[in-house]
Image (cartoon, helix red, strand yellow):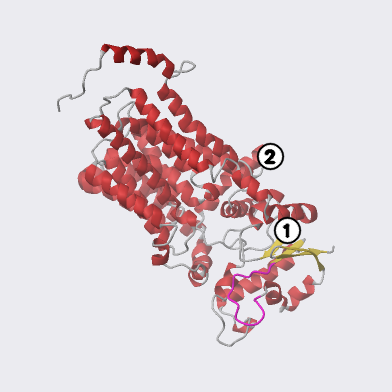
Amino acid sequence: MPNSEKPRSPQLEAAAAEARPGLAWRGLDLAQWTRIAAYGLPALWAVGYLLPPLNYDVASLLAYSERWWAGERLYVDLIDVNPPLIFLLGLVPVALGKITGLTSAAVYVPLVLALTAWSLWQSEKIWRRLLAPGSVLALLLPALAAYALIVVPRWEYGQREHLLAIALLPWLSALALRAEGVRLERREALATALTAALFIALKPHFLAYAVLGEGLVLLRRGPRAWLRQVEPWAMLGLFLAYALFVFVAMPDYFRHTLPLLTDYYLKLGQGSIAGVLFGRQVVPALIGILALGTVAWFVLRDRLGAIYAGFGLAALLIGAAQAKGWMYHILPGYIAALLLFAVVLGRAIERLAGSGGEARIDPRAHALAVLSVLGLVYGATATYFTPGFRYFEYVAQVDARLERLIRLESHRQPVLPLSPGISPFYPVLNYTESPMAMRFQTMWMVQGAYKDCLASGRLYREPAQMPKGEAFAYEAVIADFLKFRPKLVILDTFPGIPRCLARPFNYLDYFARDARFAEGFKAYEQIDQFDRYVVYRRRS
């Protein structure tokens, strides 16, 4: 294509030359300042994550890793529906906490930030092979990737889906190279593939990402070329090793936990697949990904954008398929939407500047464009979400009051919450180093057993009439109450169970029908009541 750019007059050239020094400051040019802003701004938000509170799901899983480290048996003394890998990974912050004298909760966020730094560094190495140096996209994509991985998660920071998105970014970006027959250096290929596989293995349905991603390379390069690559074999090897470990070392997960998962846990939540997919949480990201993905694929013909679009759609569908409507399930979809936005915007600006991504304007204008986007994005974010916002909300909520109460009355002594909710008990129990006085995190099994009103018209089943799972939970909570002798028992007056009779379901009344529990509870007195919680303290 002939160059249609008009030559500038000597006066304009002189003015431009005179202006150039003014675009540098303290020896750094605009591109360097753009990179500083790209990582410096999310670093401000990262500091905020170091303050309380830790995400409640993250905190509860860490607490189980703590108890496992202390000698309790996973899926016997600790009942949870998650496969064991998240608890294995949780042993890393637990061990570092023992070494440093810090709590695992204090160590966790720095570890996530370290993983994020590695992911961005590794991804940048791959992007340099895909993007023209100094181009808008070469500056914009790392900046918005850092924003997506650090700032966007907010309350969901550190969740399993957040860890997944962090770990997948280098592998996803490498797919664009591998699909065109470009191989990574062996060590780099192993690092990206094994890290991706490790976090894909956190949940069974995450395997869809591996199938779709490697399936793309298989379709593009053919079976022979694909089988000669190290990535699919490394990922398959890790998956098989983990599956063998679970079958051999964790048989109780299959014997005890999976039946409870299907019979009780999956009954919780009020969503449907269609309701979640077309609900207010998914639809904005879905529309954005479909629109931007269409531009990336059919207009820009950009394979990196197409891969991010495919990842985003898969993330939204996988999140919706769980039918819970929880934001962290679809978080990877929002992260993918931002990556896709960066690709489309960067490519579009390059097209306007000149075909093929060749800079036909001063490269400093690229940096100014990216700085303008960052100013808009972070300015809009700061209007509703500032660094450390979670801490200021935490100290003003019931969580902080509960923490003060437990520190005063039961510091480092067992606490028994009779509640359907993980929050606010986690991360409060982590911060006070007070162990949970039962093998469950919540009353989820009882909640699942009473999702519907009883046909008998009664409020509670008699022990002899309980199905196997409910009877197990009933006996387990009572046995744990007698074993741990918790200093505090905290009753949640909102049971998370439909109101079927004039009086609501009451967890304390439910267990107090047992003579052993009733006798043991005589040693407790009510000492406080706030929000929806009634607090009882053991006298001696």
Using a 10 Å C-alpha cutoff, classify the residue at mark 1 as few (fewer than 14 neighbours), some (14 to 19) or many (20 or more). Answer: many
Cα–Cα gap, marks 2 and 1: 21 Å
Prevailing secondary structure class for the magenta stretch in the rendered image: loop
Q: Residue at x 24, y 48 (%)?
A: 218
Which span is picked out in magenta?
492-505
Question: At numbered mark 1, what does the secondary structure look like: helix, strand or loop?
Answer: loop
Residue 108 in sight: yes
Q: x and y percent of residue 363 in the render?
A: 33, 23
In the rendered view, would you say 30 is above or below 326? Answer: above
Location of residue 167 (image quadrant): top left
The residue carrying mark 1 is 414
- Return the disc, 2 or 1, that comes first in the chain's sequence: 2
Indicate left or right for 253 with 14 as reference.
Answer: right
Quarter of the N terminus within the rendering:
top left
Residue type indicated by callout 1: Pro
Q: Is 497 inside the magenta-drawn segment?
A: yes
Using a 10 Å C-alpha cutoff, classify the residue at mark 2 as few (fewer than 14 neighbours), some (14 to 19) or many (20 or more). Answer: few
Q: x and y percent of residue 391 in the render?
A: 64, 45
**Of residues 99 and 337, which is closer to you in this image?**
337
Q: x and y percent of residue 265 in the render?
A: 52, 67
Question: At numbered mark 2, what does the secondary structure look like: helix, strand or loop?
Answer: loop
**Of residues 224 and 208, which is closer to you in this image?**
208
In the rendered view, would you say 313 is above or below 19? Answer: below
Q: Which mark is residue 101?
A: 2
Contact, mark 2 vs mark 1 (Cβ under 8 Å): no
Q: Residue at x 34, y 14 (%)?
A: 15
Indicate left or right for 218 with 323 as reference.
Answer: left
Q: Is 206 inside the magenta-drawn segment?
A: no
